[in-house]
Image: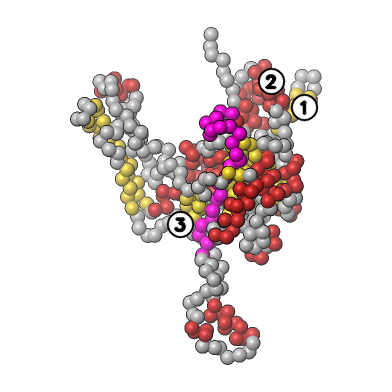
Amino acid sequence: MPAKRIFNVKDFLALLHVRPLSTGDIARKIRCNRGTALKYLKELKAKKQVLETRISNTLNLWKLTLFGNPILIGDCAQTLKQLPDESIDLIVCDPPYGYRFMNLDWDKALPSLDALKECCRVLKAGAFAFFMCSSRTDLLWRMGERLEKAGFETGFSNIAWCFSTGLPKSANVSKLLNRRAEAENTSITPEVKKFEGSFGGNQLKPAMEHIIVCMKSLSAKTYIDQALKNGKGISWLEDCRIPYSCDIEKWKGGENPTSASWRRLEGKKDIQISNNIPNEKGRFPANLLVSDDALNNGKMTRGNNKPSARTAGAGALGQNKGWNSHNNKPTVHVTVNDSGSYSRFFDLDAWFKSKLPPEAEKTYPALIVSKPSKGEKNRYAENTHPTVKPLKLMSYLITMGSREGDLVLDPYAGSGTTLEAANMLKRRFIGCELDPKWKPVIEARAYMRTKAMNV
């Protein structure tokens, strides 16, 4: 008797995030019988995650609760009160930084404590939140303190996003003295020459912003228990590995020493395998992300990752079968040789190219700039928002913190980058935005990709 298949409820949610479907349509897409589909759908209905609508005596439609991935207009401290406790799988947002960027009133203060408390309330136990923040020490410290007061756990490494297109905002002191002299109709003082080359304060060219990583407290004893309880308390770092700057050579013609066929071919029954093998998926993610080759200092280096003689494995450009005299077991020496600038170790652009779904790669083949291009911002509507974050950055964070079918919240939606990325990666989403003038832009970006997807 064949084993009974176990289905994942997230498969059903991922289907319904595109459009309402009948029970029969869902069963065909999941490849199960109608009774099994109905069982899982009723389970989701009991949890108030889906709604059932009777169309006729023979047809019913299932759709997500909060179908349409809503955009809530108003202060998120109030609009989030519509959402039930522990209903959100991940928060990714770019809130106000608190230094009045371009003299914008909405950026004059950090997010309110009430708003952050609402964010924490709606987040599931053990779920993560990523808050963009200024690298200014005072603002970074205040934001971290406020998140802790709101109930978040902040004992994690921040992620630094490094780029090369920041604009200096420092005021040249000698030029200001000249303007003052002209305004007061006085002669230029000797101080002008004395202060040539100086700038007010210490406002360096911005080349980095921080992403504060925080988590709602666990409701279980350990991370493992939390993962088993509701799938939280974990981050999907394997999906965020940075690809090598070269193509990793695959084992050819049964040459993989980990395979039974190679062992039989070579007569090796007990080959030694080590964990010290370069991972074909790339480098383990670090707390630094680099866009636009921002760490390129003009020097190209060649890396050489060569495990010890006790290592046997696969996944490198070079290989050399040998024999370990210490334990009389065969070994395979593995090397990874890749070259480029220092940026390659943290390259967000390389990750974006390698990890996105095929439909996204076709639509966005050239997003290799640190800040979003005009083509990216205006693809679906004219977008004049002053602080648009790149799609690839939000895609990386969503990938790290969620799975397909999960519900992603952006309480400070801005122009909708997070929501577009969520939709593209087959996540459900909810956005909150204070200023109603951005709603058309958000909707255009967030919903247009849904129409293009063929699920």
Q: What is the quadrant of residue 278 in the picture?
A: top left
In this image, 174 relative to 16: left or right?
Answer: left
Q: Which residues are magenta?
A: 205-229
Q: Is residue 218 magenta?
A: yes
How far across and how far down the image is residue 198, in percent? 50, 76
- To which residue does mark 2 refer? 38
Q: Are marks 3 and 2 in contact (CB under 8 Å)?
A: no
How far across and down, in percent of the image, does residue 271 sit?
A: 28, 25
SS type, badge 2: helix
Q: CA distance from mark 3 to mark 2?
A: 52 Å
Considering only order in the chain, which callout, 3 or 1, is on the residue closer to the N terminus? Answer: 1
Q: Amino acid at mark 1?
A: Thr
Identify the mark at residue 294; answer none if there is no mark: 3
Please name whichever residue, 170 or 296, is drawn nearer the observer in this view of the structure.
170
Q: Amino acid at mark 2?
A: Leu
**Given the current orientation, which residue lies at the most extreme bottom position?**
187
